[in-house]
Image (tube, rainbow, N blue to C red):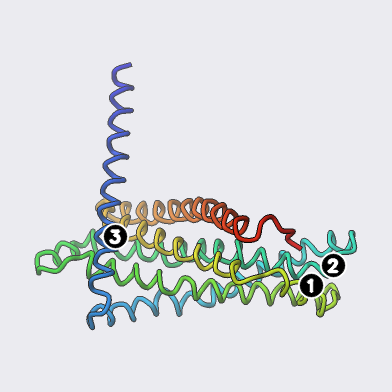
Amino acid sequence: MLRTLERLGGGTINVVAGFGDFCRFSGRTINYSVTTFGRWRMVRLLLEQMYQVGTKSIPVVMITGAFVGMVLAAQSVLQFKAVGMEGKLGAVINLSVVRELGPVLAGLMLAGRVGGALAAELGSMRVTEQIDALRAMGSDPIRVLVVPRFLACLLLMPVLVLYADLMGIAGGYAIGVHVYEISAADYWDNAARTVGMLDIFSGLLKSLFFAGVMSLICCYRGFRCRPGAVGVGQACTKSFVESCMMVLALDFFIGVFMNTVRTLIWGVQPVI
């Protein structure tokens, strides 16, 4: 019994200590991001990371968004035709993509493509003592290594979400209109009357939180990984799993908050 309580207490202390360490790490990263954003060296490092995070992620995000819209159209069109509301398909697809599926799936894809790379890269630098070498030379590793990656994710995630939204809308239109022969005029008319600027803003707001949390978790796991190849692999796995869980959790809480805002501004309105 005492051993069980001891293990439970030790595990609780480790969790609380780890969370506190992550909060200190995040606080230093955000502080350095504000104080060093305009320096030339930071701009150069930031541009390098923006290419890695943004430019190389565009094909993945666009393909994902296109297939999301096409799958939504293919799975929904028969039910809408059965009740004679196929003209409303555009409103449902566009609203789903802009509010939820575009930001969430873009966040999950970036957690796998970018987040895993961040954890592996920083974890390898940790194992090979490059981070300790930076400290020995008088540089702060968080300022040099973490801040550019954090800012690149924060700045480019909304742009990538817009790409995903655009391709999702185009994919839904292609399947709904050109495959299942829904009226294009009804499709776009209902979509235009339903999707508003607040819906687009909601998705972009989510993307900022997704990017910030994902980049902080992945960089933290890389900085705190255990020695050896096994430690780097575990850091990548933990960073991906934790990032995905946080993306889904934040999606829920931000979605509830935005629903409250819509209710306060316009009251309860029908979706279509």
Q: 98 or 131: nearer the eye?
A: 98
Q: Earlier in the sequence, mark 1 or mark 3?
A: 3
Q: Which residue is located at x 74 percent, y 59 percent?
A: 270
Quadrant in which the C terminus is drawn: bottom right
Find residue 247 and name its label: none
Is 15 rendered above or below residue 151?
A: above
Residue named by callout 3:
123
* Res 138 → quadrant: bottom left
Q: Is residue 127 left or right of residue 99?
A: left
Q: What's the residue type where badge 1 is placed?
A: Gly
Determine the CA span between mark 1 and mark 3. Answer: 46 Å
Q: Residues within 10 Å of mark 3 (few under 14, many from 20)?
A: many
Question: Do the residues bearing badges 2 and 1 touch, measured as CB atoms within 8 Å?
Answer: yes
Q: What's the residue type where badge 2 is placed?
A: Glu
* Outermost top residue: 1
Quadrant in which the N terminus is drawn: top left
Q: Which residue is located at x 44 percent, y 74 percent?
A: 156
Find residue 176 and name its label: 1
Question: Do the residues bearing badges 1 and 3 touch, measured as CB atoms within 8 Å?
Answer: no
Determine the CA span between mark 2 and mark 1. Answer: 9 Å
Find residue 86 and name its label: 2
